[in-house]
Amino acid sequence: MSSIRQVCLYLTRHCNLKCRYCQIVDNNKFDEIGTSATLEALRIIKKKIDPEFLILFGGEPFLRPDLQMIIDYTNKLDFNYTVITNGTIDRDIQNIKGITCSVDWIDPPIEKALADDVKKSIAGLETLFAFKKQGVPDVTGNMIIHKENYTRVETVVTTLSKFGIWTVLGVVHSGKGFTFRSDCEDLRLSRKEAKAVQSVLLKMCSDKKYLLHNVDAYLANIAVWGHYLDWRCWKQMSESEYLIIDSDGSLLACNDRFGRYTPQMSIFDFDELQYQENWLNDVQGCSGCFYNHIWQLLGSHKGEGLVHP
């Protein structure tokens, strides 16, 4: 039985937007696997791992012309999954079981209206409402909390919850040498702002009217982790429960570090024991991040006692 509980498959690194806290378009891998190879990757994931949850990621997955075929095959294999999209591309994709859209703002300030992360929030909200109306089983909003929108956290979660839409919360993730999130120190929460967000999230933990996918221990810590960036996966676990597959089929150490050893393997020659060894070699010594919500979402590694003073 596989120890991997969640798999993230990059369908593409292409994106039609350039959000301020994301640099994926600056780290494009243009060697994307085609339709048949993508379907084969899904078959291998199901056969060798059969994860609890599958994320179809990007870039922007709706840029893939074969997305309907990918969705149909994902359904055939009976995955529990979500497609993460910015919601700005209008395509009639049928039979999606799970959709996640970015909603960083509900009431953005006028002066920010042209920013891509604001435009996608408006489009994402409309997309979520449309899929909810269609009866899609899993409809989720993803909010990235940063210096400009941290006072809106409760507004975003409350609005989505009123319509029966769940929210996943993250914090803007700034650092040098990242391959996914950008070096956006101007958006990073100060310690004071982090404590303010933490206070709001602690209140949400005790009120079930807020539909939040994150477990309570993560919500209690997320803001200060986002400020200090000192959570280290390799100190909490001896093996990874999360497998990330890049758009060319190679494996990644994490979303923000390609790694030296992990990408030497692809999903097509996947061996779990060797993958775990490669992953551990790559992540040991990492200075840290806040990205533990991968495990928090799965309900393990509760994080008690990790709240900063």
Image (tube, rainbow, N blue to C red):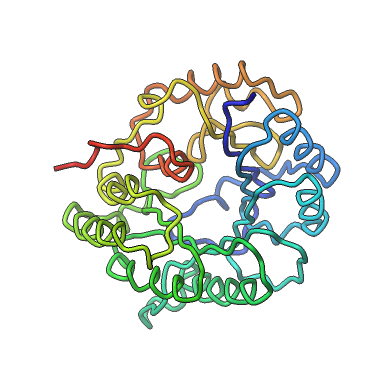
Q: Residue at x 23, y 36 (%)?
A: 305
Vertical comparison of 192 with 35: above or below: below
Q: Position of residue 279 (x, y in %)?
A: 52, 23
In the depicted view, which residue is nearer to us: 302 or 195?
302
Can you say which quadrant of the picture contains the N terminus? Answer: top right
Q: Furthest-bottom residue in view?
A: 110
Residue shown at the point (78%, 44%) measured from the top left:
77
Q: Is residue 79 placed above or below 245 in the rendered structure?
A: below
Q: Is residue 274 left or right of residue 202?
A: right
- Point out residue 270 in the picture as x, y percentages from the top left corner: 70, 24
Give whichever of 50, 92 is nearer the camera: 50
Q: Quadrant of residue 88?
A: bottom right
Quadrant where the C terminus is found in the figure: top left
Q: Is residue 188 left or right of residue 180?
A: left
- x 21%, y 59%: residue: 199
Left or right of 204 in this view: 278: right
Along the viewing direction, whichever of 152 and 247 lies nearer the viewer: 152
**Identity of the residue furthest to the left in this view:** 309
Q: How many marks?
A: 0
User: Residue drawn at (62%, 58%), measured in percent from left and top?
Assistant: 15
| Residue 116 percent coordinates (x, y) | 50, 68
Residue 97: quadrant of the picture:
bottom right
Q: Is residue 12 left or right of residue 211?
A: right
Among all residues in the image, which is located at the extreme right? 36
Q: Is the residue 53 above or below the residue 160 in the image?
A: above
The percent coordinates of residue 50 (x first, y second) are 68, 35
